[in-house]
Image: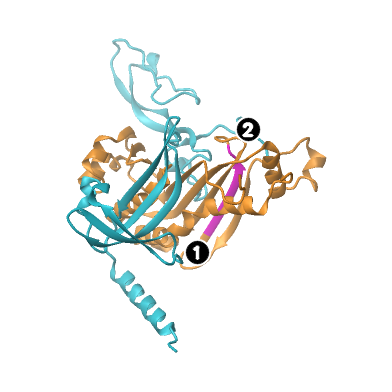
Chain colours: A cyan, B orange
Amino acid sequence: MSEPSSTLSFPLKWASKEYRKDEPLETRFFLFHNGEGCVVVREPAENRDKDHEARIPGTGSSASTVGVENNSAPLTMSGVPRTRVLRRQSEQRYILLKKYEGYLTARDEDSFSARLFENDSDYPVLDAVFDLEELSETDRELAVEGAPMVWTIGYAYEGSTRKRESSIYLRRLPAWDSEELERGRKAAKDLTSAIRWE
Amino acid sequence: MSETKRTPEAEGLEVVLVGSFNPAIFHPEWFLNHGLIGEQDANEAEVVDVSGQITLVRFCGMELQCLVDRFSLGTNNMSLAERLQDLIIRTFTLLSHTPITACGINHRVHYSVISSDYWHQIGHTLAPKQLLWNDLLEEPGMQSLTIKAPRRGGFPGEINLTVEPSARFPPGIFVTANYHYGLPKEVAHSRSAGLALKFINSEWKRASGMARKVGEQIFSKIKPDNV
């Protein structure tokens, strides 16, 4: 392998779709292969007069660098290109160690029980009891029997400090529509009829 | 250290939608007003830019980017994967008339590798140099390798798997997996958002673990020569 090169191409694109309409419907990344580049947008900018035109920033400049000379000439508005730096948030780092999905089986005043599994073929499943305090205040009202949940354990980083973290998330899913309910009923029926009792 | 069961150094997930969007909508206050995020999440949000042409905001450990023809929501914290999925689903259930032409679920993983020799060995195994490149270049190295395959089933599309050197954890490898779904043109202005959400729900588990699966295969099939 070789180290990534830095002069392959300069990542700069127009924001408006009329400038990019011939591009393929790529979804491998938002705009830039390595998550970083400049987007050019057209925005109204203060302009004094034709002798004091707004400067168009260089392609490597950071956001909001269109300059207008500070003088007393009358103001007019015109669309000028401005660059916006898009950079994927990279400082956040988390290493996922374990993930269980499942649903709540019971809840009382101080705790709740859940049935959890690591993947679809996981057997036997894990039955666990958690303190209600493990949930954020806003999540506690969602802790009802049958509520789907995810329990993750991992290492979270804060600068050079690594800490082990356990978090529980109660899922917020829209209600199933009639098509999904029908599909579920059919899947259950097929599964039941496929069982050969001896 | 075992090379077959590795824990990634860093991992991320992103959903990219292509279509027609109004970037100015996606302010944390909008998400709060529609009950999609909590008050504290909205208060702690970082609004880099929200305008009619471009939006970049960070909240709930996620990053939202939007132009008039592209939208993405991503995170580097995999404990938030389901929260991201739920937020996408609820957002575009609310914005159900948004025309969407393509949708991608992108998973990315960085692994560090025990030595430069092993790192080169991985590159030479994935992209052999003997047949062609050694005659043309001095010390040719693999920069990027993408394998594309069709994805069949209810939401036919493509799977694009890419392996590159990791710029973040050298010597290391960076693996990305893209589950791409181009929506049929005839649904673009009728039920495309609903169909894109169905694709996300249907492929989520496979897509959001695919880059790890590729990494595990690489370390399992390519053993260090000198061990």
Residue at (49, 55) in percent of width and height:
B180
- Quadrant in which the N terminus of chain B is drawn: top right
Q: Position of residue B92 (x, y in %)?
A: 32, 53
Q: Position of residue B53 (x, y in %)?
A: 36, 38
- Secondary structure type for disc 2: loop
Circle 1 packing at 10 Å, graded few (<14), some (14-19), many (20+), is some
Total numbered labels placed on residues in the image = 2
Q: Which residue is mark 1?
A: B156
Residue at (38, 24) in percent of width and height:
A64
Disc number at residue A5? Answer: 2
Looking at the image, the residue that sits furthest to the bottom is A198
Mark 2 belongs to which amino acid? Answer: Ser
Looking at the image, the residue that sits furthest to the right is B135
- Magenta stretch, residue numbers: B158-166
Q: Looking at the image, is B68 positioned above or below residue B90?
A: above
Do discs 1 and 2 belong to a common subunit?
no
Is B91 part of what is drawn in magenta?
no
Residue at (24, 35) in percent of width and height:
B43
CA–CA distance between discs 1 and 2? 34 Å
Secondary structure mostly seen in the magenta stretch:
strand
Nearer to me, A79 or A112: A112
Q: Position of residue A55 (x, y in %)?
A: 42, 19
Tell me if residue A27 can be seen.
Answer: no
Q: Position of residue A151 (x, y in %)?
A: 36, 53
Say left or right for B169 vs B154: right
